[in-house]
Image: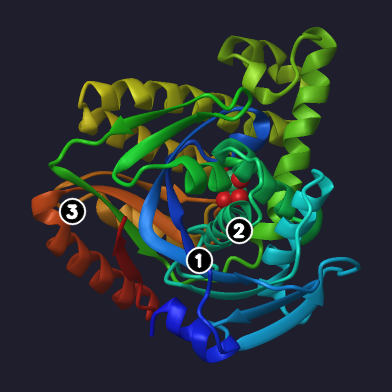
Amino acid sequence: MSIAEIHQTRYGSEPDGVYKAPGRVNLIGEHTDYNDGYVFPTPISRHIEVSIKKRDDQHINLHSHDFRDDASYKTEGYAVDPEHHWANYVLGVVQALQKRGHSLGGFDMCIKGDVPIGAGLSSSAALETAVVRSLKDQFKLDLDPVDAAYVGKECENNFVGVQSGIMDQFVSSLGEYGKALFIDCRTNEYSLHGLTDDVRVVIVNSMMDRSLAGSEYNIRHAQCTEAVDIIKKTYPEVKALRDVTEEMLLEQWGNLPKLIARRARHVVTENTRVLESTKLLDIGDMLGFGELMYDSHDSLQHDYEVSSKHLDLLVDYTMDLDGVLGARLTGAGFGGCTVNLVEVDCVDEFTEEITERYFNRTAKRCEVYLA
Ligand code: GLA
């Protein structure tokens, strides 16, 4: 059933509009966005869709097709709803828009999507972006796509309560399918970079729970702030790890607690890898780019410590598979997915082999998606 049909069945009338936004996979640049750094994600061909019809009153009625669940609120006086977790992504967007001075009336909305939920492919950012698009269009709000991304981030940070960066909403709002989007998370400058036709971005879902992701994520965030606070005693111009060079870090190494130094080293070297990656893509050097993906995983595994046994297995398996140029964990880590750069002709064999090896070792079936 299409979302318009679902809307018709649920609310008894056709929607005024249907809007969608994609999930994302990050190619390189992990845990750099909240350090004012650089990221390099790409949208995936999986989306969250919303249908909307404005109401004459102040009621917000929501229906989630995927959760087979309904929830109702008023446009004022709502709070975080612990019983309908999915609805908070809509309410948080409404609140962020209202805080910016936009006035919204009531509406009926249905939600449906095929971005795997909880897999680290940003189904929540896709939902936020689709909701912002629908409200912007229906209530004639003055918002550009970068504003739209920040509304999604405010929803996440201030309503849902995750201190995430801007990457996911930015690429969902501004990305172009089939291109990598370089984002400078301090200045919001961005640029699109094509991959060569002979490679595909392949995502492997470990099917492992990311329950640690929330709490450990906020701990990593705090550790980065700790590093900045120490380094800026010597270099007052440093506002974020983005401002720290490898030389500065080496010089400051002894001043930092060992663990904090390693966390900082991941972010500093990862920023360099992203800048290098954009150059390699522009000259079509996919082999060089793939190597940087492996370096990124190594750094996430050992310095930032956000990998898991299952993600490491999935990356290790690729080492002797034909046609794999690079592999790494993608997103926050602690479960979720790996992203792989695979030669077009080898994708089928890759899928078969990795699924079999993973199953033989873990008794779990991974899922494989083309980006
Ligand atoms: C999550 C967050 C992003 C980013 C990544 C790690 O996906 O939502 O903002 O920090 O983790 O790179």
Q: Earlier in the sequence, mark 3 or mark 1?
A: 1
Question: 285 left or right of 35?
Answer: left
Decide if residue 23 is on the left or right side of residue 82. left
* Distance of label 2 from label 1 (alpha carbons): 8 Å
**Which of the 4 quarters of the picture holds residue 139?**
bottom right
The circle drawn on residue 305 is none
Task: Specify few, some or many for label 1: CA neighbours under 10 Å numbering under 14, 14-19, or 20 or more.
Answer: some
Which label sits in the foreground, 3 or 2?
2
Quadrant (top left, top right, bottom left, bottom right) of the C terminus: bottom left
Instruction: Give the mark toward the camera: 3 or 1.
Output: 1
Q: Which residue is mark 2?
A: 138
Numbered label tally:
3
Residue at 78% x, 40% y is 222
User: Quick check: marks 3 and 2 in contact, CB under 8 Å?
Assistant: no
Residue tagged 3: 321
Going by the numbered disc 3, the residue's amino acid type is: Leu
